[in-house]
């Protein structure tokens, strides 16, 4: 995906307390948790824990970012989820 299109997609994503940054990116990319699990090699439970805010392991987030083809900073350097948009 061209960088311009990637920025447009990411600028449309909004993380809220009920919708994590990872979930927003995952859904925008069209992945189910199961599909992302197969792509990045993490279990569905690990991905669900990250989406629910129970896990923030940077190594796992890097694997997910690579699988979703987004910059690591979108998931790792994310500000708190309270109504922050992804830049």
Image: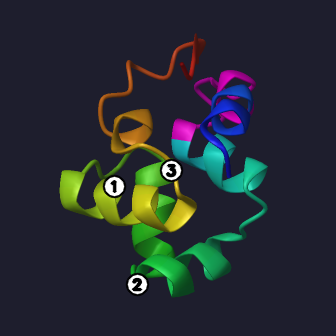
Dividing the image into 4 quarters, which one contains the C terminus? top right
- The Cα atoms of the two marked residues, 1 and 2, are separated by 12 Å
The answer to whether residue 55 is above or below residue 13 is below
Q: Which residue is mark 1?
A: 61
Reading the chain from its start, which is encountered first: label 1 or label 3?
Answer: 3
For the point 30% across and 29% down, the residue is 77
Reading the chain from its start, which is encountered first: label 2 or label 3?
Answer: 2
**Position in image of residue 20 (x %, y %):** 56, 38
Q: Which residue is mark 3?
A: 51
Q: Quadrant of residue 63?
A: bottom left
Q: Quadrant of residue 49?
A: bottom left
Comparing labels 2 and 3, the label whose residue is closer to the camera:
2
Q: Secondary structure at mark 3?
A: helix
**Position in image of residue 23 (x %, y %):** 62, 48
- The Cα atoms of the two marked residues, 2 and 3, are separated by 16 Å
Cβ–Cβ under 8 Å for marks 1 and 3 = no
* Residue ranking furthest to the top: 83
The residue segment tinted magenta is 9-21
Is residue 84 on the magenta stretch?
no
For the point 31% across and 57% down, the residue is 62
For the point 39% across and 79% down, the residue is 42
The answer to whether residue 60 is above or below residue 87 is below
- The Cα atoms of the two marked residues, 1 and 3, are separated by 10 Å
Residue 53 numbered mark, or none: none
């Amino acid at each position: 995906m061209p960088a311009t299109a990637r920025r447009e997609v990411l600028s449309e994503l909004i993380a809220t307390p009920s919708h994590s940054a990872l979930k927003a990116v995952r859904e925008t990319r069209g992945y189910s948790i199961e599909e992302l699990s197969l792509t990045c090699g993490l279990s569905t439970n690990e991905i669900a824990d990250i989406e629910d805010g129970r896990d923030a392991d940077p190594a796992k987030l890097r694997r997910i970012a690579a699988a979703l083809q987004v910059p690591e900073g979108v998931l790792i350097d994310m500000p708190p989820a309270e109504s922050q948009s992804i830049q």
